Image (spheres, rainbow, N blue to C red):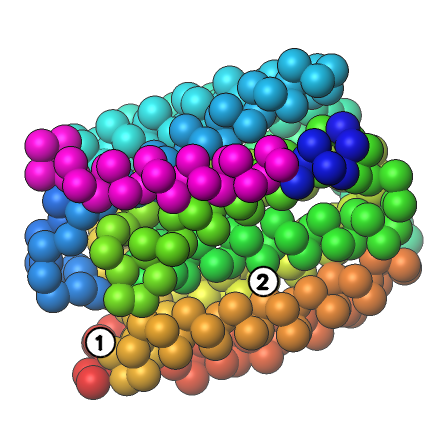
Amino acid sequence: MSASWGFLLCLGVGALGWFLTIQIERNAVHLGLVQHPNHRSSHHVPTPSGGGAAIATSTLLALLILGLSGESQLWPILLATALIAALGLADDLRDLPAALRFPMQALVLGALVWALGPLPDLPLMPTLTLSGMLLALIVLFGGLWWLNLFNFMDGIDGLAGTQAIFILLGACLLWWTGHPEAPETPAFWMALTTSAATAGFLLRNWPPARIFMGDAGSNSLALIIFALALLTLSAGQIGYQAWLILPSVFVSDATLTLVRRMSRGEKPWHAHRRHAYQQLSRRWGHRNVTLLYGALTLLWALPLAWLVQGDGNWLVVALAYAPLVGCAAWANAGGATETSA
């Protein structure tokens, strides 16, 4: 696809994402998509939700157009995104039990790993390399965790949307600098059009948010990022280490929170308000925390992901995560109590 047509598609998808978001916002009561404050909420007034369905719909249209341009690998991504978005929307409307959601997510992600493979071997040390079925299972479990942690991290205004945009654009930058022919591939424009659709939604979700994303949006965004990772890994265009570092701000917060809660015997699927970003938002407000997380991704994670592209050094991965985990611990991520304002 030429750059001019690609940018026109991005503009159209972004405008469609904004338009559909407004339509969902206006009809939220009729659709049953109003989120009322409760003990788990980070907002204080009833607010329309499910706006992420606009992201999913716009992205699916872009995937259809890109798939028709000749990239056969986008068809399984389109199908997987539609299934995951539908599951997320059903959860927005009916609050599906985890016992139903997790197996269905695992089936979709497993099919996607199979369809977009094979994955290159993953060397951990000179004498240990992961490959084949074992590697595929580890990537599958990583994808399942990523899908759910992205949902967990969608809890304050603008946070999940900005992180999705920065991760996708960061991946495109790494891909383009290492492989100048990247913009010629439909998968590259898949990432850009998804960013554009998210930006259209973000115009209404930026603090103070007029509408929330909901599971349809968070699940579909996480799925697109995971699919882009599979595509670029399989083609040898972005390495494992870079993909581990790019989302490290989200992963550090969500993982430390989960580990600390489980260490006290809490059930991981029970909703709460004790992620680092939630603890901080009660002190500093949604806008400041969203900007902080965005700055960490752009100024810390992205440069280190670019640095690790050349040699695949695991020490750089450790360097990326160590201070982020320390900061999340300082913010009381997963603590037994909620930090007060």
Q: Which residue is mark 2?
A: 248
Magenta stretch in the rendered image: 8-33
Q: Which residue is mark 1?
A: 338
Task: Name the secondary structure under disc 1.
Answer: loop
Q: Is residue 299 above or below residue 32?
A: below
Q: Earlier in the sequence, mark 2 or mark 1?
A: 2
Task: Name the secondary structure under disc 2.
Answer: helix
The 10 Å Cα crowd at callout 1, few under 14, some 14 to 19, many 20 or more, is some
- Asked if labels 1 and 2 touch by Cβ distance under 8 angstroms, the answer is no
How far separated are the C-alphas under marks 2 and 1?
23 Å
Q: Is residue 194 above or below residue 284?
A: above
- Kindly report the secondary structure that dominates the magenta region of the rendered protein: helix
Q: Is residue 297 visible?
A: yes
Q: Is residue 261 visible?
A: no
Q: Is residue 77 highlighted in magenta?
A: no
Front residue of this view, candidates 331 and 123:
331
